Amino acid sequence: MTSPKSALNITIFWDVENVSDDLATHRNMTEKIKQTGNVVKAYAFADWDTRRQMAIDLYQLGYDLLHVPDTKDNASDYKMASYILDHLIHYPKTSRYVLVTGDGDFKLLAGALKERGVDIWLISNPIITASELHDIASTYSDIFSFRPGLDCVNPEDCDESVQSIVQLRHLAAVQLQEVIRLITNTGNKPGVGHAKHVMTSLNPDFNENDLGFKHWHDFLDWAEAEGYIKHERDLPSSLLKLPTELPPHSVTISTEVSQAFAFIAKVAEDSLTEGKPISLMELGTRIRQLGLEFEKIGYRRFSDFVLAAEKRGIIRIFAPKKEGESPIVLPVYTIEHLQDWFEENVERIFGASVNVPKAPFLKKISQTLLETQTSLSELENYLTAPPVKNAYSVILQASDIPFLPPYQQSLAHILIGKGIECNDVVTKVNLELSPLGIKLQCPT
């Protein structure tokens, strides 16, 4: 992988198991890195058996793919650490290490690199990033900041609503409480700097200056004085915590925000199930008609509200394929949501002997639903509709294979249900079956 000449020699070390998104994000991230200097090497570490399409995509972007089976705990971390140390010896002129990971296991190694005068650019999902890594990094980027930007389809999409600073402060304080909960739930400590990264990631419109504070610490002091948060000051680095008793109005606001995000996801899912993904323009109109007022929960623009929903993994916004068209909005299914669905339906749909897919495959199913613009209701329909089941059975018979695992079976049913030709279905599914030594074929 090469890039324009620059004073910086760069190497990328990417822990794909810990940090990843979709191809558009990966492409944008790689291009942004290349623009800052000469990329000497680019490594990506993962169990590629469960990421066949991503492996192809990243190889085409210039990454060396290092395969690490997921059956070994922390094997990807050990392999990546080994390559970092080897690179340090053989490429001493590398002046910037781009670490795409949020795993706290790398904090000692990253600290040692920094002690040697190496510039460290950390890229991760800030919510699940170890607090110590933020403090060590010379530069930090949120992986989701590399997603394609959202342009305003209509001027009113980006018009600010008029709200008092007092109201906005209280709404921002509730958002800060959410940040503290999320960081704590991932097993990390909500340090002051870490919390700021997550706050701006989840709420792209947040700026303490707009609330009348000169500094982030001023906002935190106000939030503590109002009873929203607490500082734990007796440690080497100050941590943020939630008080035992929350202000009643903060609970009310938090509930309203959760309901608003659930509402927007339901609208996107219903539209997809009805046969067509909803456009951003239609979504704005629909939620207004149904009575959702995003201004009352802290978002001054419709664009801020939908971006905040996307950052929370509730929806995904995709750029239009044709210039002048509106972006489309799709629902996102979390691993937990899919886990519940499979546990409830696996025996009825797949058979008594089939197990619920493991987390990596549930993540792949979620991504497949996004890529094929399929709702969970549609997936269930494809898996149970007689015409789709019959077409699937014909392919199995022609291949002399009795059954497929749930992920590959789901993928095949989706593609058949979408009207994809048999040869294209088989090609796509075989890519996912190759690690198992199984190969489908179309009937002759």
Image: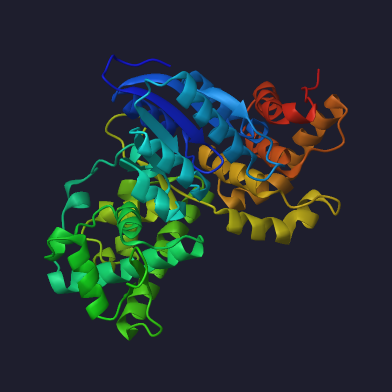
Task: Classify 159 as above or below 51.
Answer: below
Q: Residue at x 73, y 48 (%)?
A: 384
| Foreground of the two, 389 or 163 | 163
Q: Quadrant of residue 429?
A: top right
> On screen, 235 above or below 65?
below
Residue 416 in picture, x, y percent from top left: 67, 34
Which x, y percent locates residue 20?
49, 39
Q: Is residue 260 visible?
A: no
Relative to 255, 393 lies left or right: right
Rendered location of residue 252, percent (x, y): 35, 79
Q: Residue at x 69, y 49 (%)?
A: 358
**Is residue 66 found left or right of 355 in the rendered image?**
left
Whether residue 326 is visible, yes or no, is: yes
> In the current view of this chain or complex, which residue is farthest to the front?
116
Q: How many numbered marks does the figure carry?
A: 0
> Residue 186 location in percent, x, y?
50, 60
